Image (cartoon, grey):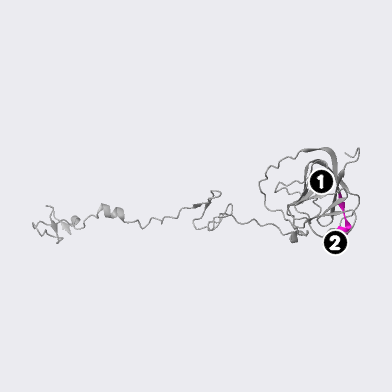
Amino acid sequence: MSTCPSGHDSASDDYCDVCGLPIPATATAAAPDVEEVAQQPSRDAAPAEPAAAACPNCQASNPPNALFCEACGYDFTTGSMPRPITPSVLDLGVPADPDPDPAPEPAAAAPLAPPLKDSWVAEIWIDPDWYADQESTDPLPSAGVPVVVQLRTTSILVGRTSRSRGIHPDIDLVADNGISRRHCQLTTDGTRWWVEDLGSSNGTYLGSSIGRLPEDPIPAGEKREIGPDGRVYLGAWTRLVVRRATPGEF
């Protein structure tokens, strides 16, 4: 469509169909609609790239199609952190732990038990007979003399230290892998003592200085009184004897 000098639209591009005036050559090509040009995308413009994905866990920037965060390992598909990879005890050449220490957990503040008025101790023995009865694959340490531990409060935790869990037993039997982190509890009224199994892996046994070794473990959560000649057996080779301290012992 052309436009003549009088403003008429003409299908002819040489003379106006309405008034007959000659149509200049510059008017034969109508200027494109400004709005139409604005709507047409530029062929030279680069396509817009997808926005980078921010990690919900550490806020690090990741490619839009990433499955895991490159900074912290956050799983964009399941919304969870991947499990940490820890070396196997077989690779380290150490015996397997029956009560392995897990990932660090917040340690709750333990209530303080009242202090003992009298002086009591626990003798820790390495008992070869108990070791033979347990058929443990760990090598038996040299028996030697018993280790004597002073008992300071009316409630004594027996087990193995776990720094990640915040477990620090009053009687730490870390050398015996058959003992759980929180194995058993010793409690007293100042005169008598009781032992309670805390759901240990290998159980807590109560015997005496005479007769055969105990065969039945104490049910978890049940307190048993330790008699004057009582002996507490636990782990692969450990035997505990609770007694009053001798004068000058502590």
State which quadrant residue 44 falls in.
bottom left
Q: Tell me where the magenta segment starts and ends, as one range.
A: 124-133
Q: Residue furthest left?
A: 19
The image shows residue 136 at horizontal and vertical percentages of 82, 61
How packed is label 2: few (under 14 Cα within 10 Å), some, or many (20 or more)? few
With 132 as the anchor, is 180 left or right in this view? left
Q: CA distance from mark 1 to mark 2?
A: 26 Å
Q: Nearer the viewer, residue 100 or 20?
A: 100
The image shows residue 193 at horizontal and vertical percentages of 81, 46
Instruction: Name which residue type carries label 1.
Output: Trp
With 38 as the anchor, is 63 left or right in this view? right
Look at mark 2 in the image and give the residue it sits on.
133
Sequence-first disc among 1 and 2: 2
Look at mark 1 in the image and give the residue it sits on.
193
129 in magenta? yes
State which quadrant residue 200 falls in.
bottom right
